[in-house]
Image: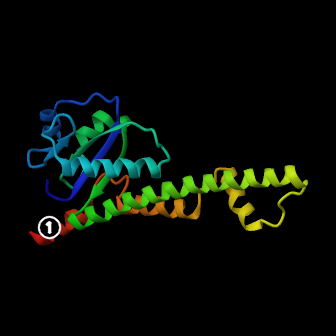
Amino acid sequence: MDYPQGFIFIKEKTKLESLSTLQAWFTADVEIYLQGQSPNSKVLDQKIKNLSEIHRFVWKKSDYQMQCIAFNHTMVSHAFLWAHNSDVLKVYWIDSKEHHLEVSCLAKRIKSALQFSYLLHELEACHMAMANYIYAKTGQTMLDQTEVDRLMMGRAWGTPSEIEIHMRKIAKSETRAGLLRRIDLEHSEEIAA
């Protein structure tokens, strides 16, 4: 499938039209990829997997079930939006092969950010267990651990780490999240033609 590629994530339970109907909505020159209906593509499946992991991280929906329609055009079909507007979760874009590599790298970094968050949770649990043990044995609270306490205080209220905040911003920017039309790419195509 040529670039640019758009990826429309919709609710899993959304009943989609046939591939031929979707194709008609997007016009004949646009390639459509629908998992389960189109011939399998490991490359597109991996892109969808990466983008779905990014989506779950950015929007804090780790268990969200979605389906995806991939297409190669600069705009989401008006007919598709008319039929499924309330079912669309988000639209993401991959502009080029180089951009695909950046998005793949981003997906790996998001896995690292999730691991970082898990390790912070483990650190908090370990610190609390040690502080409770010391208090039980000595009767003294841990008052001189201000750097650890500051870190833990924000986590207790659900405050994301600075790393998580920046990763979410980067992910939204890198995937052009939410744009329905890529006028910037249409203009570059006209210049090239």
Q: Quadrant of the C terminus?
A: bottom left
Q: Is residue 148 above or below residue 69?
A: below
In which quadrant of the rendered view does residue 89 lie? top left
Residue in the foreground of this view, choosing between 177 and 123:
123
Residue at the right extreme?
139
At which x and y percent is residue 49? 31, 48
Instruction: Name the residue: 82% across, 55% down.
Output: 134
* Chosen colour scheme: rainbow
In which quadrant of the rendered view does residue 66 lie? top left
At which x and y percent is residue 70? 23, 46
Label 1: few (<14), some or many (≥20) within 10 Å? few
Report the number of numbered marks.
1
Instruction: Name the residue: 24% across, 67% down.
Output: 98
Name the residue tied to disc 1. 190
Query: What is the secondary structure assignment of the residue under circle 1?
Result: helix
Residue in the foreground of this view, choosing between 33 and 29:
33
At which x and y percent is residue 72? 18, 52
Q: Is residue 30 left or right of residue 90?
A: left
**Amino acid type, callout 1:** Glu
At which x and y percent is residue 130? 75, 54
Task: Kindly tell me whether residue 91 is visible in this rendering.
Answer: no
Residue at the front extreme?
137
Q: Is residue 54 left or right of residue 118?
A: left
Task: Kindly tell me whether residue 53 is visible in this rendering.
Answer: yes
Instruction: Name the residue: 86% across, 52% down.
Output: 137
Residue in the foreground of this view, choosing between 135 and 146:
135
Q: Is residue 113 left or right of residue 3?
A: right
Q: Is residue 42 above or below residue 187?
A: above
